[in-house]
Amino acid sequence: MPRLLLFLLLLGASGALPALPRRRGARTPTVPYLIRYFQQQVDHFGFDDNLTFQQRYLIADQHWKKNNGPILFYTGNEGDVTWFSNNTGFMWDVAQELNAMVVFAEHRYYGESLPFGNESYSDSKRLNYLTSEQALADFAVLIEHLKSTIAGARYSPVIAIGGSYGGMLAAWFRMKYPHLVVGALAASAPIWQFGDLVPCGAFFSIVTKDFKRSGTGCAESIRNSWSAIDRLSSTDEGLLWLSKTFHLCSPLKNLQDVAVLKRGLSDTWINLAMMNYPYKADFLEPLPAWPIEEVCKFLKDPSLSDRLLLQNVFQAINIYYNYSGQILCFDMAETATKSLGHLGWNYQTCTEMVMPLCTDGVNDMFEPQKWDLKARSEECYKLWGVRPRPSWIISMYGGKNIHSHSNIIFSNGGLDPWSAGGVTRNISHSLVAIMIPEGAHHLDLRGRNPSDPKSVQQARDLELCYMKQWIKMARRH
Ligand SMILES: *[C@@H]1O[C@H](CO)[C@@H](O)[C@H](O)[C@H]1NC(C)=O
Ligand SMILES: *[C@@H]1O[C@H](CO)[C@@H](O)[C@H](O)[C@H]1NC(C)=O
Ligand SMILES: *[C@@H]1O[C@H](CO)[C@@H](O)[C@H](O)[C@H]1NC(C)=O
Ligand SMILES: *[C@@H]1O[C@H](CO)[C@@H](O)[C@H](O)[C@H]1NC(C)=O
Ligand SMILES: *[C@@H]1O[C@H](CO)[C@@H](O)[C@H](O)[C@H]1NC(C)=O
């Protein structure tokens, strides 16, 4: 089996363990917003049909200076847009300082913005309009609509902001529609995690470094856990022991089930690396501050016997899934792929968003797994009736050849595995990279917190400074 790695950029584990009640919505926005709907063309690029759908967006103008004050426009990604507004406190924080209007636009096929209602995911014909290009076109038409219908917004400078896939969209939006936005903040946006632009193993070596630095023996314990699981899986008694030890709702029956368990474990380590925030947060799951350090408290001795080692791995996993203490058992049959967000992202990784990832077990703590496009293509065909086009994103958005663009901030966290595919060096005076060494996945987009490390405070200050510059430049034209 090839590595699936369909985990959403944001939405976490694709595989096994979670079928858990999700308590989301960490942060209530400091200002109330209105929920609006806008009629969009299902197909912006063809004229054969004229179908439309309602795109949802959130809008707040409490801080907006009516006469052409700026608009901060979140380019929604793979999920319910209210989830992003709840976890993007930065935008609400700076709206006041910039006298800005705040808009969060939902990405088509997610949340309530379903082009074919409850049938949107029923076949490849209906899914055909789930692309980044169509999503960007939605944003473009929505911005034109807002500027032409809101009194006093006609000359408002607009800034695109997004995180993760939403960050890629923000950057790409500025590249493709520079007449509509004065600049973009692309946080933790792995726009180079395509083709062979970056080594496929870099992602996992960052995950591993995070565990290495969070406790001695930690990464090594995880590396040793895979073969421990294999040895136990070779007998029925061992399978039963694993099922009990990991509190699985239904027992492991065969090696396929074991593979699902392992996938769930790897996804958990990955998600922890993405969510390694300096304070308690509830993004994918409720987690303590610096969760990897908590996890590593259980993983100090890699030389333990298989059973003792795996008991510790379970304790560690429990931090991720059961921090609330409310989970009775881990249900592996009910995979997280049931949620729309996961389905949609899975489809996108089967078409345009083909991001090669691999492990070697040497530079990382995972089981070795090559990137296998052919196998992935077969899976995609089985699942969706489509095959990936791995080079299209590079043809569309330029790969590393983007120096002709301007006014984009690429911010990345040093702890975030997605920084491997991000822009981490300055390309020109207006294509700027901001590194946050103590930051996990788009920490800078979260609201201010007393436990924020200095590096993220400085990053936010610099981001604000660039945004002010773009707004000032726009005023002169
Ligand atoms: C966002 O926060 C609001 C208010 O706390 C909550 O009602 C909503 O469910 C949250 N959205 C998501 C997707 O968690
Ligand atoms: C297509 O739909 C738009 C919006 O509903 C409408 O204004 C237009 O007349 C339609 N065009 C055709 C050819 O049906
Ligand atoms: C969608 O909803 C309609 C009306 O409620 C229902 O008849 C239909 O079976 C649903 N389709 C799917 C794929 O759930
Ligand atoms: C979750 O934590 C609670 C409280 O510590 C514990 O009783 C329960 O067994 C745990 N659930 C699982 C699946 O381990
Ligand atoms: C890029 O340039 C800006 C402005 O000079 C600077 O603050 C920043 O640290 C540079 N980024 C990197 C990754 O060197």
Image (cartoon, rainbow, N blue to C red):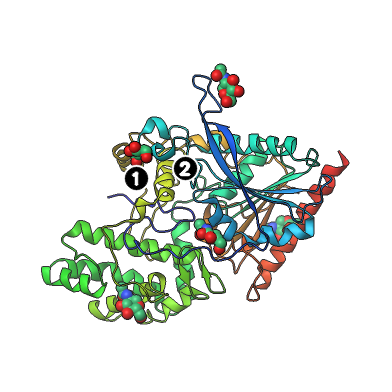
Q: In the figure, residue 455 lies in which quadrant?
A: bottom right
Q: Earlier in the sequence, mark 1 or mark 2?
A: 2
**Residue pushed farthest left?**
236
Front in this rendered view, residue 403 or 470: 470
**Tag 2: amino acid:** Met
Identify the residue at horizontal 39%, vertical 58% (top origin): 13
Left or right of 337? Residue 425 is right
Identify the residue at horizontal 50%, vertical 27% (top origin): 51
How packed mark 1 is, by other alpha carbons closer than 10 Å (few <14, some 14-19, many 20 or more), is: some
Residue 372's disc number: 1
Q: In this view, does 43 lie above or below 221?
A: above
Q: Is residue 258 above or below residue 169?
A: below
> In which of the image's four quarters is ligand 3 placed?
top left
**Tag 1: amino acid:** Asp
Inspect this view and state whether residue 158 appears.
Answer: yes
Q: Is residue 306 above or below residue 196?
A: below
Q: From the viewer's perspective, is the residue at label 1 or at label 2 nearer?
A: 2
Identify the residue at horizontal 47%, vertical 70% (top origin): 286
Label 2: which residue? 353
Inspect this view and state whether residue 377 appears.
Answer: no
- The quadrant of the image that shows the C terminus is top right
Front in this rendered view, residue 434 or 360: 434
Q: In the figure, residue 464 lies in which quadrant?
A: bottom right
Residue 126's disc number: none
